[in-house]
Amino acid sequence: MIMDMDIRRGLNSVRRICDQHGIGGVYGPVIELLECDEKYFTAVEVTAGNRVKAPHVTYPQSSDVIPLLKKLNFLEKYRAAFGQVFAKTVICRDLDVASRVARADGLDCITLEGDQHASLTDQKINELVAEQQKNDAKMAHEKSILEQLKQDVMNAEKQKHSILKSLEKKEKLLSSVLNQIEQNRANIAMKRDEMGTELVDHLTPEEKESLSRLNPEITNLKEQLITCRSNRMETETRKAELEMNLSTNLVRRKEELEAVMLSSDTDVLQAEAELKNQELMDANSLVDQLIQELKSVTQSIDEKNRKMEDIKIEKDKLKRFEDEYQTTLQDEAKELEQLLSKKNIYVAKQEEYSKKIRELGPLSSDAFETLLLKLCFTCNFHTLLS
């Protein structure tokens, strides 16, 4: 039977620990403590890999069903251990029999090919538990979503109630504004009607008499008011002119006279004035000198710039000459390389021909001339081809 590498390492670790610490009562893996017919290997391996606790078991009496425990050979002292692993497993002739026995007797059924049909195996239980956990997690998640949705609905209801109250207030305010607009329209219409009729039509005879008496007085007062406004404007203009003259002429002259009165020595003032004039003249002379120097420096800078431009032009010309010279050198180097290659070819041919001449031995003068002409023709022909 094939054993997984991890299981094998685990079993080796258990044996090493038992040996190091002198632990007794450990006999080894169940699969190593039994013997059975080779045809039952698959059934034994599947059952041992999915063992369950097995209490007392009543096997069905049928030739199509064989208890797997009865087909195993092991020491009697291991019976309890093997019974815990294999007691609830029976070998059935085929899957139909396995299905029927599993439903009727609640046993784990397996065929010789390893096909298993159990009422509930550990693997199935684990799958169901995992599925239940997934369902519980999903339900909890959906419950939290439902609670959030409920909270959102409550918030929406509160917001809706607030919006409705605000809408109700705004509707009342709108109704009040509309009423006010209607009142204003009515007042405007009434005022327009009043403006379309003469004011005299609404007066009593006494009021009409007082109005006819007061109208000339009102006209006279209006004319006097216009005259007073014109006189006031002229007076204010004159006042402004006088204040300006006072501030610009009289006040300034007063300040100058007070300054002169405060100055006790006229000669000192005159000397200071002359000194200031001399300083001003010296400053103007220095400014003129600096201006001349600035012009000179500017001319020198312009000349230097022109020289730099000429140098730059000359540098560019030399750079072009250098590039052309480099190109010429590269071309000549290529030609030299070709000539050296041809020279090497001719030297090799010369050596080859010398070797052939030596191999031919001494020749007569006619034969030597004929051969020499032939070699020259061949050499010239190759030269023309190259």
Image: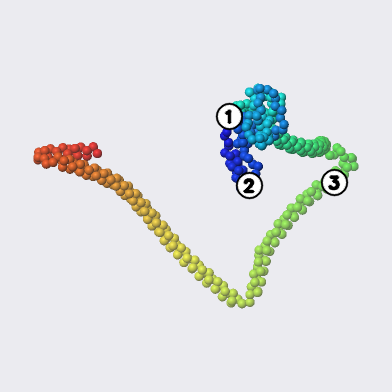
Badge 2 crowding class, 10 Å Cα cut-off, few under 14, some 14 to 19, many 20 or more, is few
Q: Who's the residue at 65% across and 29% down the image? A: 70
Compared to residue 277, the image places residue 359 above or below, namely above
The numbered dot on residue 22 is 2
Q: Amino acid at mark 3?
A: Leu
Choose the circle earlier in sequence order: 1 or 2: 2
Within-10-Å neighbours for mark 3: few <14, some 14–19, many 20+: few
Q: Choose between 293 and 265: the one closer to the eye.
A: 293
In this rendering, would 12 be left or right of 57?
Answer: left
Assess whether mark 2 and mark 3 are in contact (beta carbons under 8 angstroms): no
Q: Is residue 173 left or right of residue 350?
A: right
Q: Which residue is mark 1?
A: 38
Q: Which residue is mark 3?
A: 214
Foreground tag (3 vs 1): 1
Q: Give how far across and how far down residue 69 sits, in percent.
A: 65, 30
260 relative to 210 in the view: left or right: left
- SS of the residue under disc 1: helix
